[in-house]
Amino acid sequence: MAQMKKIFSLSTLVLTTLALQACSSSGGDAPSKITNQYCSESTLNDAGRVQFIDQSRQGNYLFRGNLPELNDDTQFDYSGLKSRLSAAAECSDIKLPDNYRIIDISLLDPILSPKDTKASLTEAKYFLDNPEQGKYVSWPLLGSFAPPLPNENTPLLAQQKIGSTYTYDNLMERAEKLHRMMKKRDKDGVKNVYYLHCQAGCDRTGMMSMAYKIIKSRNRASLATTMGDYWPVQNGSDISTHSPGCGRNPNYWATSQILWLCYTKVGEFVGGDNWTQNSDAIHRAYISSCLAPIKMENDPELKAYKALPADGMGKLILDAGKI
């Protein structure tokens, strides 16, 4: 118990430091211009954060990005968002239909953040006043205050789906629902463009985007590929084969939540009926499928995620006092 108190105390210190990077602002200086396979020229400014994720056989589309609002979050930028969606689609050799609905999936949390409250009200009001243009969906995300830790409780929590991954954030349930939404055919034939966003289009947006992809993983190999893709997509490294994401690594909250979801998926693959009894196999698979594929060469702080023991996060937590 004393050891766990120490871990959670140190985790709080990590959060205090790293949560400053949280998805709280879409402004700031734009990172330098980069080139990737999807666009000959692209920038990671506010417009460049809108990116294509997926297209379904039913003709629906999924994009991710940052908050589409103007004038201090008092005006929903519908026309600007449509322009950025078209540009992002073109970058990925996709042509959007002339007529479509925007399903605005906001990951903001109006309960915990006054800034999120203001922005959420602006979005909700816009689509209430303009229902023919789409609709507003609120899926508030928080993240996890600690990653999967190498102890006897972790397999049980994952198998029983106890914790913010499965309760407050409902990450697995929402990812599965998003897949069903992508397969939906509306009676009037109009296609839907689903737009995932938080404030900056980085942490909570990256979390939901990854959940969508993790759910699709059919085996450990495909899961490892998905995990390996996430960090380059977020931080812009290896830009010859990956889209630039939001220009930086995800923060602690988002990364911890993604690791929980990956751990759960690994448990489904190798855990059998009793994950506690098979905890050693799950931890080994978690290391190889969730942690080993992560590419973080340019971020010394986040290299600790791969430092092992067991969960890859232990060193970051235990070294919290040095951050």
Image: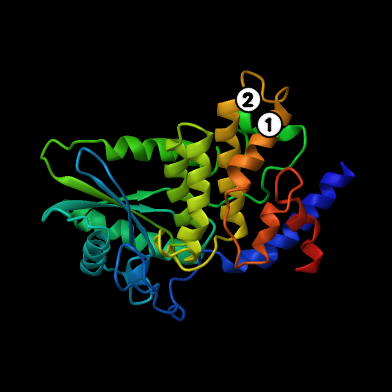
- What is the residue that sits farthest to the front in this orientation? 240
Say which amino acid is labelled 1: Pro
Badge 1 density bin: few <14, some 14–19, many ≥20, Cα 10 Å? many
Q: Which residue occupies 75% across, 62% down? A: 13
Q: Is residue 66 left or right of residue 288?
A: left
**Does 154 sit above or below residue 6?**
above
* Mark closer to the chain start, 1 or 2: 1
Give the side of residue 116 with respect to residue 166, left or right. left
Q: Residue at x 44, y 76 (%)?
A: 27
Query: Considering depth in this image, is 196 or 62 the residue closer to the camera?
Result: 62
Q: Label 2: how many residues lie within 10 Å, few (<14), some (14-19) or many (20+)? A: many
Instruction: Report if residue 223 is visible in the image.
Output: yes
Which residue carries the number 1 mark? 155
Q: Is residue 107 above or below residue 170?
A: below
Quadrant where the C terminus sits is bottom right
Q: Is residue 191 left or right of residue 84?
A: left
Q: Which mark is residue 271?
A: 2
In the rendered image, which quarter contains the N terminus?
A: top right
Q: Which residue occupies the foreground of this view, 64 or 145?
A: 64
Provide residue 159's location: percent of width, then percent of height: 62, 28
Residue 16, position in %: x, y? 69, 64
Q: CA distance from mark 1 to mark 2?
A: 9 Å
SS under mark 2: loop
> Which amino acid is tagged 2?
Gly
User: Answer yes or no: do the residues labelled 1 and 2 have beta carbons within 8 Å?
Assistant: yes
Would you say residue 164 is visible in this rendering?
no
Residue 176, given in percent of the width and then of the height, sits at 41, 35
Query: At which x and y percent is residue 224?
Result: 53, 42
Number of numbered markers: 2
Q: Which secondary structure, mark 1?
A: helix
- Splitting the image into 4 quarters, where does residue 33 fall? bottom left
Q: Nearer the viewer, mark 1 or mark 2?
A: 2
